[in-house]
Amino acid sequence: MNETKLHVTRDHLLQLLSAMIRIRRFEERCAELYQQEKIRGFLHLYCGEEAVAVGVMAALGPEDAVLSTYREHGHALARGVSMNAILSEMYGKQSGCSGGRGGSMHLFDITHRFYGGNAIVAGGLPLAVGLALADKMQGRTAITVCFFGDGATSEGEFAESLNLAKQWDLPLLFICENNLYAMGTALHYESGEPKLHLKAAAYGLTAQEVDGMNVVAVEAAATQACQAIKAGLGPQFIECLTYRFRGHSMFDAQLYRDNLEVEQWKARCPISQLSHWLQSYQLTQSDIAAIEHNVDEEIAAAEAQAEAAELEPIEQLLRHVYTEGAS
Amino acid sequence: MIELSYREAIREALREALLDDPRVLLMGEDVGHYGGCYAVSKGLLAEFGPERIRDTPLSESGFVGAGIGAALGGLRPIVEVMTVNFSLLALDQIVNNAATLRHMSGGQLSVPLVIRMAYGAGRQLAAQHSHSFEGWYAHIPGIKVLCPATVTDARFMLAQALADPDPVILFEHVMLYNRQEVVDAPTLTMEQAAVRRSGRDLTLITWGGNLPKSMEAAEQLAQEGIEVEVLDLRCLRPLDKPTLFTSLKKTHRALIVDESWRQGGMSAEIAATLTEEAFWLLDAPITRVCSAEVPIPYPAHLEQAALPSVEKIIAAARALQGLQPRGQP
């Protein structure tokens, strides 16, 4: 397989950096809003894993399909789902991307081919198989990308979906975000085979492992995988080694891991790494401050919108169970 | 006058669907090379090829979820789960995805999926192969549940299910596949119940595999002067309440025949609905004939003792007919 050469320009790297900063600031603000009880239910934050969503999305086109998990804000933002719509959704407002009906774990945006959002670990993998099958059978060249975590690789649906993808030769890219914990269960308690990409290789998929804290490496791997799919080389699997800096959800006391480990991974923060690297390309602190300022303005505007937006009238409770206006 | 077996009727329905719409495909275990576990899809692989008659690995959750995803992606899949017994492996996909994606997405996503499952007991297949869970599925908002009991319904309900933009599950009782009947022109909507036999004394409410037993019981009861109105629900979700109430206005007595277990079964839902909404039409408590509270046993005598039978239906109808409202002799 030829090495994929990425066109790594300063502008492109700045875009990647901005996208990661945007996710990080958004997630941190969500944590505050959750504590203020503006956001309710479960909140699963993506801080630390930004390079995976941003790097993979950079390899995709608008015709491609994306499925994610309950830890999906980063994927939705990186995919282009409007921040206003995402935050309004978490406020439960009617203008949310899911009409306010789904919340944090169920963000959907069909215009961006963003199919959620799934609260059942590994629940999205069979859906991804079907979306890829539909594209293939209808002669479309789109790729379906399915994100999931290390915990999902233990579920039966993981085995079933990878086997189906290979058996039917589907245009499907599996992205496993191995952040070393399935909720509070560390990898070595969870998986007899800790090299998760080997599990995929056992099902016949081309599988690789990549440094998930390096957005350039992630983008290169994803680009190569997409090219392989388009060249007819079958479904692909990338295990991204990453880490979440915060707990599983806002309820997590993190009793299962120690601070030293968290600090060690924070030292490898994808945003810090790329910022440092870009400083040799004349990226200054004020450049970064400008990015953060823009992001914070966008977040503030999204908050104002979400606050002002309407709740769905209770009289409409029974909507969206079946198709309206049918038979 | 065309006479077909129930099996042939479904096969014809599948052929028609595959010919009419290139988006339709049939996927499931052994639907292709084996010809279908119950021979329903025999010959279809040769006619339509392996892309559209798609044998799946043994992965119920995987291929039912794939059917959902394919429906999201613009196909019109018919997923065959060999029997309802194996569908438990796919419950998460059905309940947490198929039934909910429209709602969770605020109306953006549509899941025009049809799932077909064989169900029911009577062939001594023992506890794990004899379930009736159509009532469980009828509990879930977001899906529709059909039980074709006649060859005509087997022939025409599939097309209606495919035309429905929401997920529809079709339940085919295993004891019906060999039945031969004349195929009538379809006259009912997908969701309407059908009065299969008119009567003035009591309304027998049933569906699917229990229709033949109910009709036979009604014939015998007629000879003793008890006129049973046999109502075939056809659709369990949504329930055709107007047809139920119209019948009860005439008979004032309700007998439900349900092959699932009594506690928490579909019959309990119907009885609750009638009690809530038709109480003042009733002259007697609602009576149910259900399977005994035991996993279905293997030996014929015990299996038959566990399941609803013509004799049990007759006995229940006689008892119901004999009940008088208080204050009357």
Image (cartoon, coloured by chain):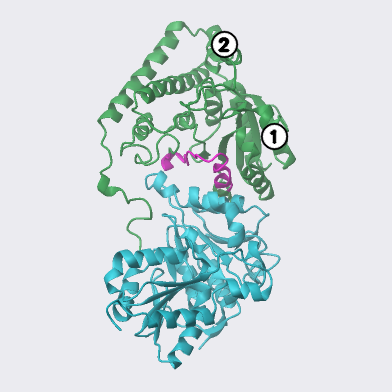
Callout 1, which amino acid?
Answer: Ala
Above or below, B33 against B322 in this view is above
Quadrant in which the N terminus of chain A appears: top right
Task: Look at the picture and state if B22 lies above or below B123.
Answer: above
Report the residue at 38% width, 23% height from top: A35
> Which stretch did the figure color magenta?
A108-129
Q: Amino acid at mark 2?
A: Trp
Q: Chain of mark 1?
A: A
Image quadrant in which you'd find residue B120: bottom right
Residue A310 placement: quadrant: top left
Q: Colour of chain B?
A: cyan
Q: Residues within 10 Å of mark 2 (few under 14, many from 20)?
A: few
For disc 2, the marked residue is A277
Residue pointed to by mark 1 = A207
State the residue at coordinates (65%, 30%). Answer: A239
Crowding at dot 1, Cα within 10 Å, few <14 / some 14-19 / many 20+, comes out as: many
